[in-house]
Image (spheres, rainbow, N blue to C red):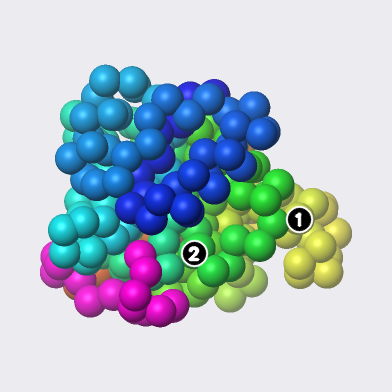
């Protein structure tokens, strides 16, 4: 699996490279700024790009903007955002094409190397990998079909957005997998998702879930979850 990495901190960039290579990924490019990311994605057509939000020169949202531009130039390229900050405006922008292959993980909450590698694989395959804190913040405002979901169904959908399997959801909620399956079937029906591959419908449900968030005008105010000295 071919990966492009955009991270300005050299030690962290090298650490991500080594981590992924040790697990069988091929890192085809590792860059430190937005233009480098766009150029690398165009040249390499990777299976997934792992991108920090805050890159030089202003360390605000250059990585996010570059990811959006890369996805515009190479439609559907999977993007995994890895940052210390939650940029709420990214959701509707990055998900606008509805093609999936999106993840957003917070650096200081990635404690399990195996889970991180699995998240990269899941996003590369067209799925989603959302940090629970990101999901929590995106849950602040909902609209449209999501209003028809019960509180439990919204909880299940949030766990799907995190990339959890039915078994994983059942473990978190302390219910049976059969109960989870019923909730998911109800979610699909209420969101009017057509019969299709189950995994694809899960992605569509997450896209509907995230796209319903009322994001502030661009650029958005970031919610800081770590020190402002690093991105």
**Quadrant of the image for the N terminus?**
top right
Classify residue 231 as left or right of residue 14: left
| Classed neighbour count for the residue bearing mark 2: other residues with Cα under 10 Å, few (<14), some (14–19), many (≥20) | many
Which element is circle 2 on?
strand
Please name the residue shown 34% across and 78% down the image: 228
Please name the residue shown 54% across and 69% down the image: 108
Residue 119 counted in the magenta span: no
Give the residues in magenta.
Answer: 217-231
Determine which quarter of the picture holds residue 53: bottom left
Residue 227 counted in the magenta span: yes
Q: Which mark is residue 119?
A: none
Q: Choose between 226 and 101: the one closer to the eye.
A: 226
Please name the residue shown 24% across and 47% down the image: 33
**Quadrant of the image for the C terminus?**
bottom left
| Of pointers 1 and 2, the one earlier in the residue sequence | 2
Which element is circle 1 on?
helix
Please name the residue shown 27% across and 52% down the image: 63
| Relative height, residue 224 to residue 191 (above, below) | below
Determine which quarter of the picture holds residue 195: top right
Classify residue 60 as left or right of residue 116: left
Whether residue 22 is visible, yes or no, is yes
On the image, the x and y values in percent for residue 221 come to 23, 76
On the image, the x and y values in percent for residue 14 come to 49, 44
Whether residue 208 is visible, yes or no, is no
Q: Which mark is residue 106?
A: 2
On the image, the x and y values in percent for residue 60 come to 22, 66
Which residue is labeled 1 in the image?
168
- CA separation in Å, label 1 and label 2: 20 Å
């Amino acid at each position: 699996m071919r990966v492009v990495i955009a991270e300005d901190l050299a030690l962290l960039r090298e650490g991500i490279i080594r981590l992924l290579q040790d697990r069988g990924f091929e890192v085809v490019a590792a860059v430190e700024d937005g233009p480098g990311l766009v150029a690398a994605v165009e040249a390499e057509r990777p299976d997934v790009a792992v991108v920090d939000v805050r890159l030089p020169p202003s360390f605000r949202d250059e990585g996010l903007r570059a990811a959006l531009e890369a996805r515009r130039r190479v439609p559907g390229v999977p993007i995994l955002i890895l940052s210390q900050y939650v940029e709420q405006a990214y959701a509707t922008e990055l998900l606008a094409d509805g093609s999936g292959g999106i993840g957003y993980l917070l650096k200081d909450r990635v404690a399990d190397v195996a889970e991180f590698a699995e998240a990269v694989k899941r996003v590369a395959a067209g799925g989603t990998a959302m940090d629970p804190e990101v999901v929590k913040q995106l849950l602040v405002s909902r609209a449209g079909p999501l209003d028809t979901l019960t509180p439990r169904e919204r909880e299940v959908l949030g766990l799907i957005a995190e990339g959890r399997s039915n078994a994983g959801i059942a473990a978190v909620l302390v219910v049976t997998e059969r109960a989870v399956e019923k909730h998911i079937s109800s979610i699909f029906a209420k969101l009017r998702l057509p019969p299709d591959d189950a995994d694809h419908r899960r992605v569509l449900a997450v896209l509907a879930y995230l796209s319903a968030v009322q994001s502030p005008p661009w650029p958005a105010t970031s919610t800081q979850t770590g020190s402002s000295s690093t991105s």
